[in-house]
Amino acid sequence: MTEPAPVQSYQLSSTGGSENATYAFTGGYLNQKGTIKNTGFTRYNLRSNTNIKKVRFGENAQYSYSEAYGMGVNTATAGEDQGEGSPIGWAYRMPTIVPVYDIQGNYAGSRGSRLGNAENPIAVLDRQKGNLSKSNFFFGNVFAEADIIDGLVARTSFGLRYENYSRIEMRYPNLEFSEGNTSNSLTEVNGYRTEWTWTNTLNYNKVFNEKHRLGILLGTEAIKSSSRETTAARNDFFLLGDPNYYYLNNGASAISNGSFGALGSLFSLFGRADYAYNDRYLASITVRRDGSSNFGPENKYGVFPAASVAWRISEEDFLKDVSWLTDLKFRAGYGETGNQRIDANQYLNRYRNSIIQSGYGMGGGNGIVAGVWQNSYANTGVKWESLKSLNLGVDFTLADGVFDGSFDWYNKKTSDMLYRVPLPATAVGGGTSPYVNIGDMSNKGVELALAYHYGRNNDKPFKFDIMANISRNVNKIVKLSDDVSEQPYGFYRSLTTSLLKVGESFGSFYGYKVAGIYQNADDVKNSPSYEGARVGGFKYADVNGDGALTPEDRTIIGDPNPDFLYSLGFNASYKNWDFAAFFNGSQGNDLYDVNRYFTDFPSFDGARSTRLLNAWSPSNPDSQIPSSYVGGSTLEYASSSYYVQNGSFFRMKNLQIGYSIPMENASKTKTGINKLRIYVSATNLFTITKYTGLDPEVGQSFDTFSAPGVDRGVYPIPRQFLIGVNLGF
Amino acid sequence: MKNLKYIAVTILLFSILSCSKDFLDKKPQGELTEEQLTSQDGVEGLLIGTYGLLNGNIDGTWGNYGAGPSQWILGEVTSDNAHKGSSNGDQPEMNALEQHSPTSVNDNLENMWNRCFEGIQRANNTLKILTSLQAGNGGTKFGAEREKEIQAEARLLRAHYYFFLVRAFKDVPYISETTTTPTVPNDKDIYPEIQADLEFAVANLGTAKPKGEIGRMDKYSAQAYLGKVLLYQKKFPEAYAQLNAVILAKPALNTLAFTDNFDITKENGPESIVTVQHSVGTDGTGGENGNVGDMLNFPYGNGLPIACCGFFQPSVDLASAYKVDANGLPLLDGSYRTNPYKSDFGLTAAQKAAYKVDQTLALDPRIDYTMGRRGVPFRDWGIMAGDSWIRDASNGGPFVNYKNTIEAAQIASGTGPGNTNITGLNVNLIRLADVYLMAAECAVETGDLGRAMTLVNAVRARAALLPGKTIGGAPAANYKVGQYTSFPNPTYARNAVRFERRLELAMEGHRFYDLVRWGIAKETLESYFGFEGGYFNYLKGLTIEARDTHFPIPQQQIDRSGGVLKQSTGY
């Protein structure tokens, strides 16, 4: 299903200018084939910056065109969820006795007794190779400035982002699939996303008495964003899968179409004052008032102040003579920021008139009359989430830059967290629950960065640098609103993977704690048990001690937050050779491997993990893997610590070796080339981890909100080998 | 020049600041607000939406099995009538229901709970916005007559959704249009509320369909439903009155064909009393308004007109119950289990190859309109071929479901585009024969055994009119439906009425709920597990506990209720 995939990338840039104007142009091309068969990505981009100094006017613009083809063109990003209905999902769900092709050379599949409902991933990848998505992306900005009085500058700037995209998707008959379909179809999607930003500022900068530097900024910013997408589809095309023929009007049945869009705006007023004395004492104060269309009339605005001070102690007289101390600075900052990134109109009850969701055959027969239903429920009081953070830090450079580093301590408190708390069906039926300001969360942590540089100061032929970073963050839910005691979430099939609970980390894993395997009938009888408990099945911990295993015994079974994260970098060069390596790692985090729902339990017919070869049996009584039994209680594959593993890893992220060909004398005059460097690099060379899933770097899965550390089958990060050339003219 | 700059900057700033208020006011995209909806059309739309959930579906098609109006999982697979079917590993949560060991995370139960409460929300919203409109908060008000009628339709539908819930879960929170909290405790009997809604509907609906639209509920729908709800509460005289009213108003049962209830071209006839309309338009809705609840319940095999997915298979016990004695009467004493009818089940490959259906068996013809069995024509699909029509006969048995299937000839117009397993066949929640048999129960319990026999015989007389299936011109069985000549005592009468109810309404979603309200679920099912467990290991030795009269409340809903909802006792 996977294959080695070539990547080509080219960048060409040109910069230049004169006293009055500067310019920069960049062009690029990227062609990346997917490591999953029949997938790939192409991108062209152009970029320009111009700055005409005399008239205080400028622009920068960027354009790119990209194309992606094949199955899952929008999700085939490393670290992203693939899920049960994807080639990766099917590859682990398809029984291993099903071949890729049958004896007649057609695709084989799960149509047959007890073969489950996985689809042949090779067949899907092949059939969907014609799926194509295209995107045009433009980003541009123009600005103008004018002096009003000495030191006071007015600036207005207008920026625009615009993307339009289109996509075609084809479906073939897939009769080899147990739940296959005889029809073929085409779906076509077209849409745009746009956002403009208009910023106006007045900026006053002045130095008094050579030592007092004062800066004052006042400004407004307005942002408006909108998007719209049209989808249309038909079935039954005369020719199968020929893109030349695949236009919607050629489809004979199942005519469908739809569109949706979004609209949002932000308006801010802000002011900032900076003051510095002799570059030794620095202070800054900011206040902003942000308004968002996402909130109701009473809660549109949030006010967010911030202040910071810094003391460059190394500039003080009493330290000026300390020769080994090159630079030393203490920093302290406090700031508040707001978050309004939620779906629009949460403060309103909203209804839809729909033929699908609320239609009914009122007249009998096949005619359907559209009806109305409430698809979204209001929280009239929804308001800004705010983040208050206090930061203390120190930066230092020692021995003329041989050592440098920084240390930070922070305490962040998120208040009124915006969260879509799923309400019971008695409140919202099948509609969408609104975002609420659910509670407060705290993040406290430290970050330390250290670096050692050799040979830089006196430009020795052999130079090297070592950089190390380590950070620790402690996350805790401090408060949940009154009507929420704890909030299980992260729904996947019958699993509920995650929990919000006061005093615990965000997204803690939630479920039964496996206490062992029932060894014999007496064990079942004498231990806490549940309906359908059996010899060879899971015995869970009776957390509340009532002698029975019930949902009340669910508890926290893991923490997706690491104890610490770290990285290590190493650069070296000798004459024309250069070398770089980068490693990163995470320690002490847990991962929740949801895929075991399919591979380790009889939830669905299909392939099983080789883990089960070591399952419990009377002759293998120490195994912690339940014996396979399709008649077992569904509680055996409920969310439990069986799904949770240590997710710590250490990974070699990147390795690069380069050689620059000396150009000073020989060819410069003839070819115009003044720089030529050839390099080879490799990414993701090795990973040390005990995690048994595909990849320990798991993205966050979103259903209503993020469930960190829940692995729903990620697209693994590929190992990449790269050969490159840098040329300079 | 300098002044111009000041002016320009000042104008700029003021224009930016002054437009900010409107700038931050953005209307919902493609959605209606309450204000826009407070009109006659808005209220009528909400009412249509309330009907729209009768098929148990909001959108999409897969996964709406628990809430399907046929109640095939919670009403039939849980009883002695049917198996989940398909293969053992497919939809294991349904196995747990068949074996009466569901946990509170069973997806079919969540589906049932969530969909019913969506229906209730829609009914409540209809009533709420109607009240607001009539209070003068919107456009033109309704006249008093239509106002009452809308209330009656909405309250009848609300009663239906609550009835579905209370039958399945027992302890159900009651949310009305005036409830303001996200949920309320589920510690009260909600039958009085259901009854009140239905009584209101009986009083305010006319005998003609509202607005002349056949899909709507009328007075007879309300009376029949009220009768049924009263019967569930064992209020026999009151139920009897409501049910009798319906019987009197409708044509005699023997003038109506049994098959019309399961024929897409004959639906909405006089026998349809409370009906869920299923429609599969060519409007691109993809079958969402069709019978999605039963979309898995077709035979399974290559080359069949509809071939998904082999679920909901009649039991050997049900097939055998259609055996009749020399007088054409059912074997009420349970002796039908002697020498049971099990088609080619359990035969060796050689025996199967040589198998011929026994055409001399004395059978009630309703068997061949309730299930497909090997050797007998199945609608216009041809002769039912046995194992090649079945996904895994060793798991689901030798029979296939009949009533929710349609004629092959109707597939083009009667199934969803691209989804032949989603049909437009209606599901009758209450049909006239059901009303007869419910009235017969009331008659037995109020001591009128003669009338009970008359009603049962009416149902049987109509069954006797069913054309027997033929194989090459010869009857596929010795079809016979006799009339009872006497109900000697209440026990006999009760047994005869209940047996008739099973034969007439098998696979229509009643059986398990009937066993529970008769108080005989434990004895009946344990005896069934003993019998049927002889063929299907997974039923062997199962027992029924007190709690198994209902199902656990979805844990997810308890989790979301902030401690207000309590799991029902025993779970």
Image: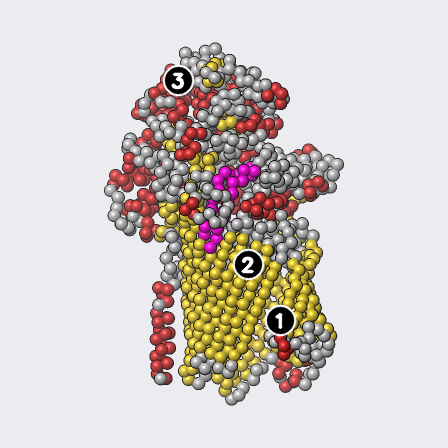
Answer whether residue A204 is visible to the viewer in this image.
Answer: no
Residue annotated with mark 3: B465
In the displayed image of the protein, which residue is found farthest to the bottom? A209
Q: Position of residue A509 (x, y in %)?
A: 60, 51
B525 and A491: which is toward the camera: A491
How far apart marks 1 and 3 lie (CA) works out to: 92 Å
Tell me the mark number nearer the camera, choosing from 3 and 2.
Answer: 2
Q: Which segment is the magenta one? A: A166-189
Where disc 3 sits, the SS reads loop
Answer whether residue B221 is visible to the viewer in this image.
Answer: yes
- In the rendered structure, find residue A42 and report the number of the disc placed on it: 2
Q: Position of residue B539 (x, y in %)?
A: 59, 28
Residue annotated with mark 1: A727
User: Is residue A167 highlighted in magenta?
Assistant: yes
How far apart marks 1 and 2 lie (CA) works out to: 22 Å
Q: Position of residue B423 (x, y in %)?
A: 43, 34
